[in-house]
Amino acid sequence: MEIGMSEKLRSAFWQHPTTRLGWWAVGLAIGWLGFNIGSSIIINIRSRMPSTSENIVLINYGLLMLLVGLAAGIVALIALLRKSRRERSWLVWASLLPGLMVIALLIGEFTIPH
């Protein structure tokens, strides 16, 4: 029997996350994306302003952004590998990307001299 298009779209991959960990991973990934957009706006505005002593705030903002991205990747990985209820949603798979990007950034930062 041939599977129709409606049957393919009902697969677990195309559905929303079904576990609490899956939703946490998606929420953290959205938060990381918001931090990145905010970072771009702050850098754009700051480049037009004279230098001030707000560097500690910007450093903390950047560290928080990295931690949120790393947390999104770790939570998504746990949700995907958990034996009891494995998550299969594409949103959770996409939530792995912030963690991978943060890891790639950190590897590049510590291995490439500058």
Image (tube, helix red, strand yellow):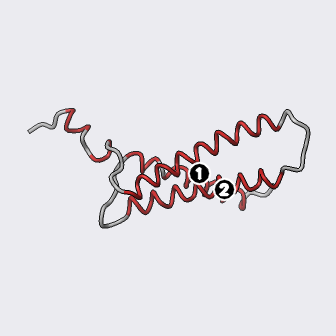
Asked whether 45 or 98 is in front, the reply is 45
Q: Quadrant of the C terminus?
A: bottom right
Q: Is residue 17 left or right of residue 68?
A: left
Q: Quadrant of the N terminus?
A: top left
Taking the spot 38% from the left edge, 45% from the top edge, the residue there is: 90
The residue that disc 2 covers is: 64
Whole-percent x and y of residue 55? 83, 51
Q: Is residue 44 left or right of residue 73?
A: right
How far apart in space, not on screen, are marks 2 and 1 (Cα)?
15 Å
Depth-wise, is mark 2 or mark 1 nearer the camera? 2
Taking the spot 72% from the left edge, 61% from the top edge, the residue there is: 110
Q: Which mark is residue 22?
A: none
Asked whether 27 or 9 is in front, the reply is 27
**Quadrant of the rendered image containing residue 86:** bottom left
**Quadrant of the rendered image containing residue 77:** bottom left
Q: How crowded is the residue under tag 1: few (<14 C-alpha within 10 Å), some, or many (20+)?
A: some
Q: Is residue 77 left or right of residue 98?
A: left
> What kind of residue is marked 2?
Leu
The residue that disc 1 covers is: 101
Which of the marked residues, 2 or 1, is nearer the chain's N terminus?
2
Question: In terms of secondary structure, where does tag 2 sit?
Answer: helix
Whole-percent x and y of residue 16? 35, 45
Question: In terms of secondary structure, where does tag 1 sit?
Answer: helix
Taking the spot 46% from the left edge, 55% from the top edge, the residue there is: 24
Residue 109, compared with residue 2, is above or below; it is: below
Whole-percent x and y of residue 68? 59, 55
